[in-house]
Image (cartoon, helix red, strand yellow):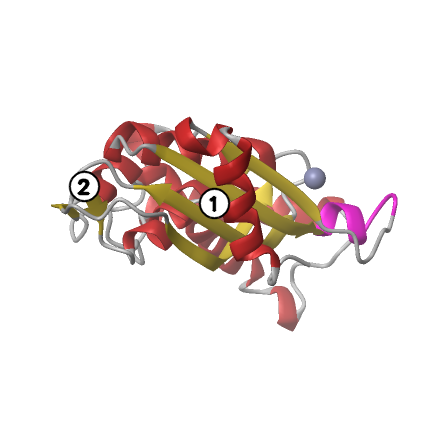
Amino acid sequence: MIDKDHIPDRDDDIDGYTKIDRYNPQLIQNLSAHYLDVLKQIGENPERDGLLKTPERIAKAMLYLTHGYDLDAKTILSSAMFKEDYSQMVIVKDIEVYSMCEHHMLPFFGKAHIAYIPNGYVVGLSKIPRIVDVFARRLQVQERLTNEIRDCIQETLNPVGVGVVIECRHLCMSMRGVQKQNSVTTTSAFTGEFLKEKTRTEFLNLISSKLS
Ligand SMILES: [Zn+2]
């Protein structure tokens, strides 16, 4: 976790979920010093032209890639909940996922497919991809990412059921070690009605045309 004293500047983020583009200069400076050392340790010359601003660029990129720590997914969801009688399955599929594995700090990326069955309330559809981002923009493992999205929707919206399927390629697999270039990892998590085979099958059929 980012030290609370060192979180990015939040002056323009008072509602708790606006994308963060401005960072605490002291934090950038601290991180840059560490990345400068990393460049030296791997045998690079940080003085050469192409690398002069690299430590600072990595620091800013890393803060962006982990900005989910500073956002609250439940706040985002509950900001757009509406009373509605609709009681059929709502599916948002092919949501882009970009995250970073916590074991190697290398990217994993792919698609999320999310469904829920309303129980008196629906949520603005754009909020579903937003909460995926909140949990993905942290150091993660795909299994936990899947569960956190499910739990957030279940606990905030209290629907009849939630289904989450995520399929991702992991660069820590394809760039190093086992080098299974084309393998895709699929994870899923369900609650309520989706624990029943009939509902789950309906959901999986509806998204399956897009499954890799
Ligand atoms: Zn990894």
Write the residue at 70% across / 45% down.
185
Q: Position of residue 74 (x, y in %)?
A: 26, 36
Q: Which residue is mark 1?
A: 136
The quadrant holding residue 158 is top left
Q: Residue at x 33, y 31 (%)?
A: 154
Magenta-tinted stretch: 171-178
Q: Is residue 82 left or right of residue 111?
A: left
Residue 128 left/right relative to 79:
right
* Numbered circle sitting on residue 121: 2
Q: Is mark 1 within 8 Å of ligand 1?
A: no
Q: Is residue 109 something one can see in this rendering? A: yes
Looking at the picture, which amino acid does disc 2 mark? Tyr
Q: Which numbered circle lies on residue 38?
A: none
Q: Is residue 203 magenta?
A: no
Compared to residue 48, the image places residue 107 above or below, namely above
Q: Position of residue 174 (x, y in %)?
A: 79, 53
Left or right, residue 53 beside residue 71: right
Q: Residue at x 82, y 57 (%)?
A: 181
In which quarter of the view is residue 160 placed? Answer: top left
Give the vertical position of 182 relative to 139 (above or below).
below
In the rendered image, residue 79, in percent from the top left (x then y), is placed at 15, 45
Tell me the element at label 1: helix
Residue at 51 percent across and 51 percent down: it is 112
